[in-house]
Amino acid sequence: MKRYMSLFLSTVVILFVLSACSSNDKQQESAPTGNPPTDQTATFDNHEQIIAGLDLNQYIVDHIGIQSEEGIVFAAHEVLGTEVKENKLRVYVWAKAIEYNKKGGELQEGSAIQLPLALFIEQLQDGSYQITQHYLPQEGVNYMDEIKNIFPSTVIEEIKNSSGRSERLTKEILTQAKQHYSSKN
């Protein structure tokens, strides 16, 4: 119980520090690679297939995860909803990232973060898809206003209904870390 309370408090502190240190750095971030987005109307017929073709967990590691020690950050997510708006596929997820390190033969947890995240996906000229930016709510007194500005009401309900989400994602991340570190032996 003390470990979970410590993890919870650590997460809260990390989120607070993150919001103070990176006011605009990670609120809107672009990851341009490949061909530029097309000016034509994009085709987003099969959201699940588009999402499956992108490595959302790696995007979360690269853009949201925090590495505070010499560990490796692993991530997992749960899709809360999708919509097409302004010629972009918006994918709303609950993202979680945890740093793990192996010391003395044991996995040790480092920094961690979990939060709702809006990913914006555009279709490129070659027909492929790319995450071009993301938004996350800033912690603090305006947190709920940020949530309301970023997410549609149906997703806000999903954000509130966490029912074991954190535990499921932690379990998935721990499995990734165990697989990674067992392959290193």
Image (cartoon, helix red, strand yellow):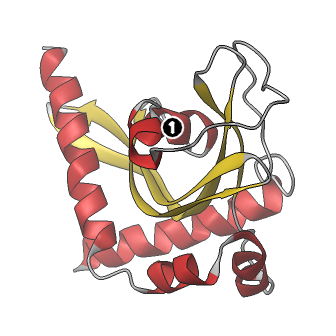
Q: Nearer the viewer, residue 89 or 149?
A: 89
Residue 139 rendering spot, x and y as whole percentages:
72, 73
Which quadrant of the figure contains the C terminus?
A: top left
Q: Which residue is mark 1?
A: 61
Residue at the spot 25% in from the left edge and 32% down from the top edge: 103
Residue 12 lies in what quarter of the image?
bottom right
At label 1, the amino acid type is Val
Residue 30 rendering spot, x and y as whole percentages:
78, 35
Give the number of callouts.
1
Q: Is residue 149 above or below residue 20?
A: below
In the displayed structure, does residue 106 sit left or right of residue 76? Answer: left
Q: Residues within 10 Å of mark 1 (few under 14, many from 20)?
A: many
Residue 179 rendering spot, x and y as whole percentages:
16, 29
Question: Is residue 67 in sight in this rendering?
Answer: no
Residue at the spot 57% in from the left edge and 33% down from the top edge: 62
Q: Is residue 102 above or below residue 76?
A: above
Residue 131 lies in what quarter of the image?
top right
Q: Is residue 109 above or below residue 128?
A: below
